[in-house]
Image (spheres, rainbow, N blue to C red):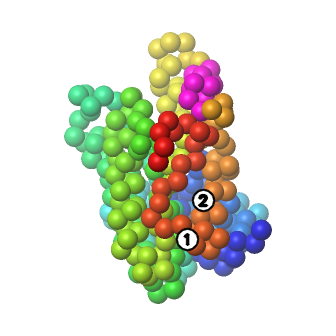
Amino acid sequence: MDLELKGKVAVITGGSVGIGLAVARGLASEGVNVVLCARDAARADGEARDIAKTFGVKALAIGADVSKADDVARVVAETEKQCGGADILINNAGTGSNEKIMDAPDEKWQYYWDLHVMAAIRMSRGLIPSMRRRGGGVILNNASICAKQPMDYEPIYNVTKAALVMFSKCLSNEVVKDNIRVNCINPGLVLTPDWKKTARQLTAESGGDWQGYLDDIARRNAPIGRFASPEELADFFVFMCSDRASYCVGSTYFVDGGWLNVIV
């Protein structure tokens, strides 16, 4: 299926690994030029070079910590300079937390707020002007099933991802008149390096069987009985970026293998 995305420009935060990288590669396979933003500039550059070679598109790497306002401003300026702006923004940068509310200091709350919420706000504000100039665009915010169905060991993650869902709805109402579609995606179990890191942390004192821990999570929580691959989730992102999803506006979509236990 031709999704008619060829020649568009997509900015992906957290674009050098996991879901972000899978989305970048999925978009590139449709002919989209991609901008990979990541804290590890060397890794992002290597992945961008591979994408350009594999798919024959323009791929730019920008080393940036999008929890910082100055870094976001630099990403926006460089995208404008190198690509003339953007048609697609994937606000994907994020990570799990692991704490208890009574123990977590203000600084930890602030960091995750800046990473999960303010990064999306600043990136959106920065790139929407070029989307307007280019005739429209798509913004997808990668939240989590935890925004609706929290995990007990990461309350900060739960809270900030829930805020990202609400931001998506509010922004959608503001910019739909500019032919900019904003939606939010709440993934369930996706086997990313971050899940592996969290599993290792949580099993460190009980023998370190992190793989068994993840297998048990999948069996207990997802009716499908397994984690998704990043590529499975990326396929949905790519579809949502296309005009095939032109009537999808201001919604939150669960891609969770049946994990969510309520009707929404």
Q: Which residue is mark 1?
A: 247
Where residue 64 appears, x then y in whole percent?
44, 59
SS at mark 2 in the image: helix
Where residue 198 appears, x then y in whole percent?
49, 31
Horizontal side of 79 relative to 174 (left or right) equals right
| Image height of 119 relative to 11, above or below | above
Q: Which residue is mark 2?
A: 237
Residue 34: which quarter of the image? bottom right
Q: Nearer the viewer, residue 89 or 41?
A: 89
**Residue at 55% across / 41% down in the picture?**
188
Residue farthest top in this picture: 206
Horizontal side of 168 relative to 86 (left or right) equals left
- Which portion, as a residue range, is magenta? 210-222
Q: Residues within 10 Å of mark 2 (few under 14, many from 20)?
A: many
Distance from label 1 to label 2 (Cα)? 15 Å
Identify the main secondary structure in magenta.
helix
